[in-house]
Amino acid sequence: MSSRQLLFRVFYRLGFTPWDGHPLAESLRALVEGESALPARTALDIGCGTGDTSIYLAKHGWHVTGVDYLARPLDRARAKAAAAKVTSSFVRADATRLTSEGVGTGFDLIVDNGCLHGMSDADRDAYVREVTAVAAPEARLLIVAFRPGSSFGVPGIDPAEVQRRFAAAWTLLDSGSESAMDHNGRDPARYYVFARTGS
Ligand SMILES: C[S@@+](CC[C@H](N)C(=O)[O-])C[C@H]1O[C@@H](n2cnc3c(N)ncnc32)[C@H](O)[C@@H]1O
């Protein structure tokens, strides 16, 4: 188990999960409910935590698989989905090993709210490879990530790095400040919407 995974495990055990209950990303709402909303098909929620994004998508008709590498948040996600009376599949899997851990393929929408920005360089390499492998040919990918230095304890990821990492197989359609994570005007998070295009 990596030190980062251990840290998340301790956080969940202690109940120190400041990301729980935060407002849903406006960039996600735009893709799901906006003027040019995507048709509700299959979605993968990477690093789903206790499932808020998955449950939101399921409520809007998406067939959702939420993945996290820890059992505790997944148990909580299943309970929250049951309470919300929505069907969503929650699978224990590492985002750097999606293909070998049986998550499935051909996802039309892949969402990452706060997972990639915490990863090491090597894990980021594997993440891009795996996300690309499980995406449908014309999939959309939404990443919401802190910039470096914007949140204590989170490495963050630079916008240029996000673009560089996905350039081979994805085209950036839109990006900007994620207003749902404004944090009193400190504006720490950005969103990135990609379309699967390359080989
Ligand atoms: C900051 S939390 C965000 C949770 C959720 N997306 C939300 O917005 O509430 C990050 C989550 O990603 C999970 N995670 C981090 N790295 C992961 C990896 N390599 N594979 C799967 N899950 C991971 C953590 O266990 C944690 O639940």
Image (cartoon, rainbow, N blue to C red):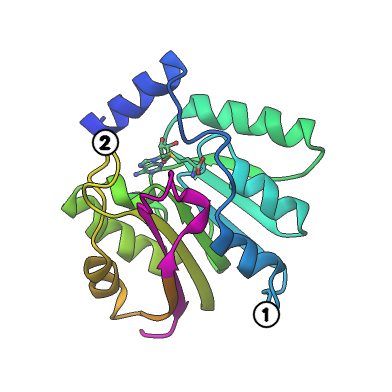
Where, quadrant-wise, is the C terminus in this rendering? bottom left
| Residue at the disc numbered 1 | 36
| Residue at the disc numbered 2 | 152
Measured as percent of width and height from the top left, residue 60 is found at 76, 58
Badge 1: how crowded within 10 Å, few (<14), some, or many (20+)? Answer: few
* Residue projecting furthest to the top: 14
Q: Nearer the viewer, mark 2 or mark 1?
A: 2
Give residue 51's quadrant in the image.
top right
Q: Nearer the viewer, residue 35 or 194?
A: 35
Q: Nearer the viewer, residue 119 or 35?
A: 35
Q: Nearer the viewer, residue 31 or 96?
A: 31
Mark 2 vs mark 1, CA separation in Å = 35 Å
Measured as percent of width and height from the top left, residue 116 is found at 34, 52
The stretch in magenta equals: 176-198
Q: Is residue 107 above or below residue 181?
A: below
Measured as percent of width and height from the top left, residue 8 is found at 35, 28
Badge 2: how crowded within 10 Å, few (<14), some, or many (20+)? Answer: few
Q: Amino acid at mark 1?
A: Ser
Q: Residue at x 72, y 74 (%)?
A: 39
Q: Is residue 91 above or below residue 7?
A: below
Q: Nearer the viewer, residue 14 or 178?
A: 178
Q: Is residue 71 left or right of residue 160?
A: right
* Residue projecting furthest to the front: 185
Q: Is residue 136 visible?
A: no
